[in-house]
Amino acid sequence: MKIEKTKTMNNKNSAHLPGLIWTIIRTDFKTRYHGTLGGYLWALAKPLSMFAVLYAVFSVIFSMDPNYNLNLIIGLFLWDFFSEATKTGFLSLQAKTFLLTKTKFPPWIVVLTSASNALITVSIFSVAVCTYIFVFRRPLSLLEISCFVFYVFLFSLIIIGISLAASVLFLRYRDINQIWELLLQAGFFFTPIIYPLNIVPHKFHFYLYMWLPTAVIQFSRSVLVKGEIPTITAHIMLLSGTAVVLFAGTALYRLLAPRSLERL
């Protein structure tokens, strides 16, 4: 009887998960921009202002590249998605302590939904940039658009893997958040966002691609700007890297979550 009751309760909880996830996403979205005059436009202001500054500074240096402005804004928005989503993921469990202690549901849902605001922003940008390219540059094929959506999806999985591990580590080691901030600062310049990849000696490209944001940004630029689909080998490497990060993050979360969550 007890086993049947437990199964019934688990089934009921599972049935309510989609509604719970939607409620958390909607609440986070409303809370973040509630009371501001700019509202959701503030989410777009940071990468756009950064684009204006960097373009003004570096457009002269890389004036020989006619696609520099488009490559720059694609790189900035994808990097901002990665940066904002992971930083929110780090603090997700700590920030939702009040919810986790009052309601019974899997804590990993909080981690997954923490990237929702950043995902909404990059989704709006994706529609805007594809529309711009289609109208002012060249027609985009369904395959090219599908590839770009696929890269954003893989980027989301990478973020989830990092966030799952980092959210439980942060409950134990608070300094990890500051370390990640420093890594993001270094990662921004390590990733070919403000400079073209071709100015880096080819022998170093492998190391740049080991940093997965480089692969996602470069593949996205390739299909949207150049209309070139990366090789099967390149896709396998990106898929493998994504799988490793997601698996490692999930494993670390499952290992540390029981004790780490006791600190809430």
Image (cartoon, helix red, strand yellow):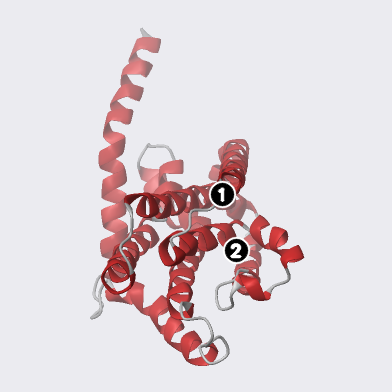
User: Which residue is found at the position 43% from the left and 54% from the top?
Assistant: 152
Identified by mark 1, the residue type is Thr
Neighbours of disc 2 within 10 Å: few (<14), some (14-19), many (20+)? some
- Quarter occupied by residue 256: top right
- Total tally of numbered discs in the picture: 2
User: Whole-percent x and y of residue 216?
Assistant: 52, 58
Task: Please give the label number shown on residue 78.
Answer: none
Neighbours of disc 1 within 10 Å: few (<14), some (14-19), many (20+)? few
Q: Note whether 5 is above or below 241 in the view shown.
A: above
- Quarter occupied by residue 38: bottom left
User: Whole-percent x and y of residue 82?
Assistant: 50, 62
In this figure, which residue is indicated by the disc labeled 1? 231
For the residues labelled 1 and 2, the Cα–Cα distance comes to 36 Å
**Closest to the observer: 116 or 77?**
77
User: Which residue is found at the position 39% from the left and 54% from the top?
Assistant: 144
- Asked whether the beta carbons under mark 1 and mark 2 sit within 8 Å of each other, the answer is no
Tell me which numbered mark, 1 or 2, is placed earlier along the sequence: 2
Residue found at the far top of this picture: 1
User: Whole-percent x and y of residue 92?
Assistant: 46, 55
Task: Please give the label number shown on residue 177.
Answer: 2
User: Which residue is found at the position 55% from the left and 78% from the top?
Assistant: 194
Q: Is residue 64 left or right of residue 95?
A: right
Identified by mark 2, the residue type is Asn
**Closest to the observer: 140 or 81?**
140
User: Whole-percent x and y of residue 177?
Assistant: 60, 63
